[in-house]
Image: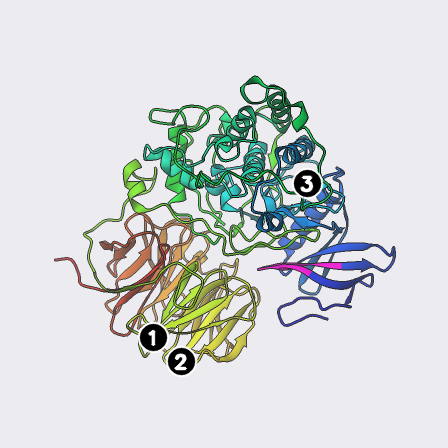
Amino acid sequence: MTTPTGSLEPDTLIHDRYRVTQQIGRGGMGAVYEAVDTRLGNTVALKQTLVRGEQLDDAFAREARLLSSLRHAALPVVSDYFAHGDSHFLVMQFIPGTDFGALMAQRSAPFSFGEVLAWADILLDALDYLHTQIPPIVHRDIKPQNLKLTPRGEIVLLDFGLAKGGVTSTGATQAGAASLYGYTPQYAPIEQIQASGTDPRSDLYSLAATLYALLSNQPPANALDRASAALQGRPDPLTPLDQINPQVPAAAARLIASCMALNASERPPSAAAARAELAAAVRTGSAGASTAGMNTVVQHAPTQQASPRPAAPPPFVPGPPPQPPQITRPSPLVPLLIIGVALLLVVVIGGALFVVANAFTARRGPNDTPPQPPGATTIVEINPTIVPTPPALTPMVEFDTTAIALTAVAAQTAAGGDFPNIDATVSAVQTQVAESVGQIPGQQKPSGDSFGTTLLEFGADGTGDGFLSDARSIAVGPDGAIYVADYSTGRVQRFSAEGKFERSWKLEDDRPILAMAADRDGLVYVSQNALVSVFEGATGKPVRTIAKGEGFEDLIVLGDGSLLGIPWASGDIVRLDSKGRDLEKIKDILEEADSHGSPSALAADGLGTIYVLDADAQEVYIFSSEGKFRDKFSAPGAWAFSKLAVDGQGKIYVTGFPGGVSVFSPDGQPFGTISVSGVARDLTFDKENNLYVSTAQPRILKIGIAPPQ
């Protein structure tokens, strides 16, 4: 038996074999349950993913087969998989205990070096096992929340939802058709954040960042902030670990810093090499002293008290990196960082990532991982791609995952672990960083003069009422009320026309909010994966739910009150009435324009003309209300998460970077730009032709449109 959100209730018997005991974790796209295998009588973990589809079914089966072949003391065993209703299920060994994220939250001091040393040795051995599979398997989401300490003191690496690896039925390596990108900011290497290709050295970064957290009881500075500091000539914000915790030998601290090098080519070449270096670092210790006594066994009780952390040093005090000296131009790392951070300027959290094609090909070093082709959003990469590996390794492929997450950080914890909060996001690097390093290669700046007057600006980062937490979608009601939706928390807030908080409500379903629109009757439509929820804007009272397949990537309200949407992972455009009944379907709309791209954003003018953005191609296509192709024009500032709007005079507005919002005349000619501080996420117009923009800062802007003189 399931709940309205697709969760299984206790005592549910599924697959005629597994009886659910309790839910032990939940995320945006699935859940984990403790269950009893009624055939064998043992306790198992059921990992549920709430998405189906032919490609995803195949991907799920490949993941299950791959994971079932793994055997290592630090890895859970997969014993079965099946599909049931709208969900996939992976049956895994149930791992009792507590994850390290929870253990860290309970502590006021770091774990002892002896404990962490023993865990590090086991985990490096596990990574060596994974990375030497044929083809190699890269975990890509190592972090404290994905490590569990059992009551016997054993450490286990969980959640292969973002793993890469796998083979076809013929034995050839091949990327999947529905690969996902996700990560946790503090523990992800820069190549994963920029989606330019991960390899086994990426796992070394994540493991080192995790060890850093365990030995300091605080997360390390993330790669995005460190890259920004390097480009601006500032000290690396990653404080040397032995300065935070004197218990850590200097040699071990240097090794952890080496594994966290921004340039993958400067990290140890393999997990085996890092393991050997760790053993050598322990033998020599700090200042050459013997540290044999530090190699203690793992404690069986997770409540062991370690030596208290020094009270003096604040976290991330700027200072010189442990090795090598401060990165400055013309370091060989700079070309990588210029491309990496430039790409990061368009990263929004929540979440799946756009890559500028071949931007770094001419500059990368001999050991750098070449970029993958464009076409991947933060959510799903549709086109199969071969993922290169270092020369010494067997060619590796990107593995199809089932941890379907609509934000790059909604990584689920398998085998009994808890789900981290989806709202862990990467903040975009501010505009001035881009200006300091120049333009993203291959991307043009928007043309035209800057115009527009800010009439209203409000918003501050926070989770309470009136604050903004990963705010993205924005809509304006007929009374001027402003609606703002948090991408990952399921919260919608209503502000007055003056920007004063009035009320908020949360959706029952906890999946990310993809789009939002308001109609002339004051109803607010909120699109999530698999459904659209309709509310009275004035009260927040639910009116109805429109269940339509896999939901809509974008959704707008037309002048006649009908809805126009882009179904998820589809090339179609669908028109519905306000009750959700189908009125019209324009199948593969871009094929009408002889394009093989996919629509990513929608807009329409008062005459019913439809504007469709293909962000990958950086093109805007213009269609009649019946879907007949009329024209197209280039939008060079567009990227994977650009949104589209049309004002009362027929001008087209496209969010992008740099320059904020690009404006085009009705015939597609560049008209001007509207500058905003930070990255523009969504935009809409009110009936007075005022533009509203949500930004990553987070801020909400109301802009009066005045054309350049």
**Are there few (<14), some (14-19), or many (20+) residues within 10 Å of tag 2?**
some
Measure how far apart labels 3 and 1 are at the Cα level. 53 Å
Please tell me which residue lies in front, 582 or 133.
133
Please tell me which residue lies in front, 573 or 440.
440
> Mark 1 belongs to which amino acid?
Ala
Measure how far apart labels 3 and 2 are at the Cα level. 54 Å
**Whether residue 565 is situated above or below residue 203 in the rendered picture:** below
Q: What is the span of residues highlighted in magenta in the rendered image? A: 24-34
Confirm whether the magenta stretch covers residue 350: no
Left-right relation of 288 to 361 = right
Q: Are the residues tagged 2 and 1 within 8 Å (C-beta)?
A: yes
Which residue is at a point 63% across and 35% down the rendered structure image? 116
> Mark 2 belongs to which amino acid?
Ala
Q: Residue furthest right?
A: 40
Q: Please tell me whether mark 3 or mark 2 is closer to you in this view.
A: 2
> Mark 3 belongs to which amino acid?
Thr
Q: Are the residues tagged 3 and 2 within 8 Å (C-beta)?
A: no
- The kind of secondary structure element at disc 2 is loop
Q: Residue furthest left?
A: 709
- The kind of secondary structure element at disc 1 is loop
Q: Are the residues tagged 3 and 1 within 8 Å (C-beta)?
A: no
Residue 481, disc:
1
Residue 505, disc:
none
Dot 3 corresponds to which residue?
168
Which of pointers 2 and 1 lies earlier in the amino acid sequence?
A: 1
The C terminus lies in quadrant: bottom left
Dot 2 corresponds to which residue?
538
